[in-house]
Image (cartoon, rainbow, N blue to C red):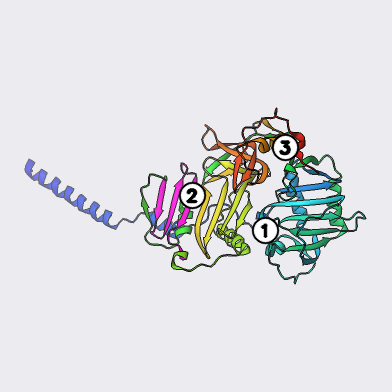
Amino acid sequence: MNVETLKSIILVILIGFSLLLTVALWNFQPEYENLEKEEGLIEETTIGGEEQDVSSLVRPSQFVFHQSGDYYDFEDAEDIELTYSSMKNWTIRNFRSTESQDPPTGEEAMVEVIFPAEVPAQAIPDIFTFDDSEMEPPSGQFNRIFITLNTEGNNAELLFTSDQAGSTSFRASIGSSDAAELSNMMNDDDLLRENIMFDGDEEKRIFIPKERVELPEDQIDSTEIGLLPLTNELFGESPVVREHSSSTSDQRLTDYSNRLEVLGDGNRLEFTKLNSSSASGVQTALSSFDLLNNSMDFVNTHEGWTDTFHLTSLNPSTSMAQFHMYFNDLPLLESSDDLHKIEVEYDGEELARYMRPLRDFDTSFPPTGSTQELPSGESVASYLMESRQYNMNLIEDIQIGYTLEPQDAYEVYKLVPAWFVLENGSWKEISDVSPAEEGGVSNAMGSN
């Protein structure tokens, strides 16, 4: 066999192998495609959080104990949650509407339960236990419950009311055993700290700790929340979802009716409906009760309560519900990328806007052991009244909360306690007052 014949045979063999490989590639179907279909990965719509109910999301921000003209609240914020959990198990009797909206006066012993948002009265049966299971849910709203303790210890009278003019109020009562729990707390000096009423304003009724407050500076770890389940949930079965370049966001997806943006270095999602139903003249405003339930149900559909969130604002006029994240039973009131809150907004009964963090926080990070001492409430009140930065008429609330600060370590954040003021609907850190500023005590306290 000469060389040319050998070359021809080898060439035929190589051509045969090439044809076989080509046919094999044409008929090859990778296994992971079938796996995706079997597991339904493309239809995943949950992000690994929890579902919540109204009684979990609605929570008071403060219990104020009134004793002979003095004010006290819980020194440990954990006692707010514990007491509220106990309240939800009380049996409420004789629930009825009343024309009186004014808080009780001249009472020797009274507890004022303050909520950060106007709570729909229709939600009361979802939060508390009633002796009348057939009670019709009332209409109206409340942000305070005044509990007047009977000196004989037989029972206690409740007044559900709002500081908003024209709101309907409700009265009810609880039995002696339930009233005894509050009475015991009121007499336990180890649980309470003295408060002052800001500017002595009986209408705004803002209560803050009189003395300095020391709180830990904790660090928390975090993990990224996947975008795919949220994309599936928010766009549904839309066949035309496209990614577009944007100079204002890290990622932008749209189907020309809705827009999803990833912002803040991938830490926050904002979904917006582009075509408003109000533009076509169709407007159906949600009631506050429907706004609360629709917002809750929507986040529940994708198990979106990835951390502890509580209702902090419910505004039917703007159709928006806002929920702040809580750690150590204190609210997160500031973060660089708005990672500390969820906002749900409606256009009629359709979702119009959804903003949420794309990070899931873990409190199991080892404690730092460091603490921070905050200025006294007296010095904060004096500073606010004397400063030109603040308009006293616009101040709605004053609270201690956390600022969420990113650290150099990857995915680690620091919880820094601070004083905050709610002015014109926005929380702002009070950063200029120092513990050394203790002047203006009498003005800050106002008249009791």
How far across and down, in percent of the image, does residue 286 sit? 57, 65
Q: Is residue 239 magenta?
A: no
Q: Which residue is mark 1?
A: 119
Foreground mark, 3 or 2, reads: 3
Label pair 3/2, CB-CB below 8 angstroms: no
> What x and y, as percent, mark residue 368?
64, 31
Per the rendered image, the range of residues in magenta is: 250-277
Numbered label attached to residue 269 = 2
Q: Amino acid at mark 2?
A: Leu
Q: Residue at x 37, y 52 (%)?
A: 243
Give the structural element (helix, strand or loop) at label 3: helix
Can you identify the residue that label 3 sits on?
Answer: 377
Q: Quadrant of the C terminus?
A: top right
- Left-right relation of 178 to 33: right
Q: Earlier in the sequence, mark 2 or mark 1?
A: 1
- Residue 369: quadrant of the picture: top right
Which residue is painted at 80% across and 51% down in the image?
111
Q: Give residue 280's quadrant in the image.
A: bottom left
Question: Which of label 2 and label 1 is nearer to you?
Answer: 1
Tag 3: amino acid = Gly
Q: Quadrant of the N terminus?
A: top left
Tag 1 or tag 3, which sits nearer the N-term?
Answer: 1
> Would residue 179 appear left or right of 420 to someone viewing this image?
right
Camera-side residue of 439 and 127? 439
**Of callouts 3 and 2, the N-terminal one:** 2
Q: Give the left or right position of residue 100, taking residue 312 as reference.
A: right
Q: Does residue 98 lie above or below 369 as drawn?
A: below
What kind of element bears circle 2?
Answer: strand
Q: Specify whether residue 265 is painted magenta.
A: yes
Gap between marks 2 and 1 measured at Cα: 27 Å
Tell me if 21 is positioned left or right of 7 in this view. right
